[in-house]
Image: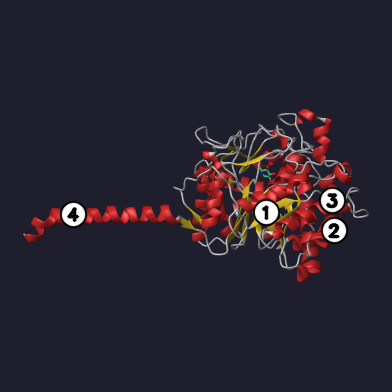
Amino acid sequence: MLLLRRAPTVILVLYSCILLCESKTVNEVRHHGRKFPDGFLFGAATASYQIEGGWDADGKTENIWDHMTHNEPCSTDDCLNGDVADNSYNLYKRDVEMARELGLDFYRFSISWARILPTSFPDKINEAGVQYYNNLIDELLKYNIEPVVTIYHWDLPQKLQEMGGWTNSFITDWFADYSRVLFEQFGDRVKYSVYWITINEPREVCYQGYGTNTKAPRLNITGMAEYMCAKNLLVAHAKVYHIYDQEFRATQGGTIGITLSAQWYEPENENHAEAAETLLQFEWGEYAHPIFSKTGDFPPVMKEKVAAKSAAQGFPRSRLPEFTAEEIEMVRGSSDFFGLNHYTTYLVYSNESLEYDAPSYYDDIEAKLYHPNHWSGGASVWLKNIPWGFYKLLTKIREDYDNPPVYITENGFSTRGGLDDDDRIIYYRGYLNEMLNAIEEGSDIRMYTAWSLMDNFEWMRGYTERFGLYEVDYESPERTRTPRKSAFVYKEIVRTRALDFNYEPDTTVMTIDEGH
Ligand code: NOJ
């Protein structure tokens, strides 16, 4: 009776408790955010051809992007090229200053092969080129910012291309010789361990550059050239891994691995689960399986499908080259970490109808991918903002490859420019949140890299798509760099080591915090 009479009071008390408790949680999140693990590292990335300019400065010779953009200027959307780009060849101190403003733990950049080795080979080392990267590395180290160095980010010397580029198996030696020079020149910084990334995004190098005409050298020989490229690239990578491991690691103490581009492929419905898995195995399993699986070699489904199609098409052997037993062993395990560039998710359905010209890569796969119309995204047609795909991808990497250390070496969003980039902020927060979900479930993710520190030459899109935390003014000779709103938000994430969805930055002045 008493209880009954008091019921309204009890309910009121309970209700206010719920309100209070809830607001406490909200407040906690507002003021403290969701924490990143201790020791987690934050950085930002760029790549040589996309930012340096100085295309023929001080002895540098032509690479495949110089060659393509000079010979066919309107191969890019705006008919522009990387001759000057962000002029980082001269403005690298400002780049490091920006990394300091953001409070970054590391800066990921790449080295231009043709700047270091003008003949493509180590018979002649270009001292001016070496000096440029020494200056950059020293400037970073001065402010305790770790260099994360990509050895190859798509700018192959043109001469090597004329000898077949990544389809010539001699490239495994050419790449090893070039890499050894880099270890000798830059690997010896005392207190610090340089992180080396052998090759950035093999899929884009091989499929886009050799299978299609969507990246230099635009060979467009699908169903054939991208597979030859893949095999040589994996062997080249592994050779370099073992050179570092055997000749340099003991004295230099760095880590070395490869960066793969991996998107998430979601089946349209459960009937298409097998198709989505097959497509995934072709798109990035092609590179991940040989290195990170227990057995090594190309994914079984890929070997079976290309062999069967090739036989039916009258080829005397599979269009997918075979690794020797020795090569399988050399490639297996040849990465200290899983370098991951991730941007987006696709839906997949099985498609066995012969609507593709055969032979072709997608005819081999027998599946199709697309983005539903209602998915929103960035300025790049391929980039939709689907954070849950990042979580699923990270979970798959953990489960399929025995939880390797994962370095997120790129993630980011494109706009058409402008300083108020709320869409980019929403993207970064969503993806970081899903990454934290994966970490909580046990994924061993150790670093995160925003693409990009600043706007730059976005390959075939020229300067029409902007990925920068800093906007670059291409009208000004100084290539003035100005922080976007996202730069202030990223800085706060790095400073607090936490993700706070409610943080609204004051974007009036960007400063360098003490200790940077
Ligand atoms: C990946 C590439 O590594 C980088 O060069 C490119 O600019 C970004 N994706 C954005 O497309």
Numbered mark located on residue 11 in the image: 4
Q: CA distance from mark 1 to mark 3?
A: 19 Å
Of the image marks 4 and 3, the number of the one nearer the N terminus: 4
Q: Secondary structure at mark 2?
A: helix
- Asked if marks 4 and 3 touch (Cβ < 8 Å), the reply is no
Q: Amino acid at mark 4?
A: Ile
Could you tell me if the residues under marks 2 and 4 are in contact, i.e. CB atoms within 8 Å?
no
Q: Earlier in the sequence, mark 2 or mark 3?
A: 3
Residue bearing mark 3 = 129
Going by the numbered disc 1, the residue's amino acid type is: Tyr
Give the foreground label among 2 and 3.
Answer: 3
User: Ligand 1 is located in which of the four quadrants?
Assistant: top right
Name the amino acid, label 2: Val
Residue ID for mark 2? 181
Q: Residue at x 67, y 50 (%)?
A: 97
**Which circle's residue, 1 or 2, is located before the other in the chain?**
1
Q: Is residue 179 left or right of residue 6?
A: right
> Residue drawn at (86%, 51%), measured in percent from left and top?
128
CA distance separating discs 1 and 2: 21 Å
**Residue 447: horizontal and vertical position, in percent?**
60, 58
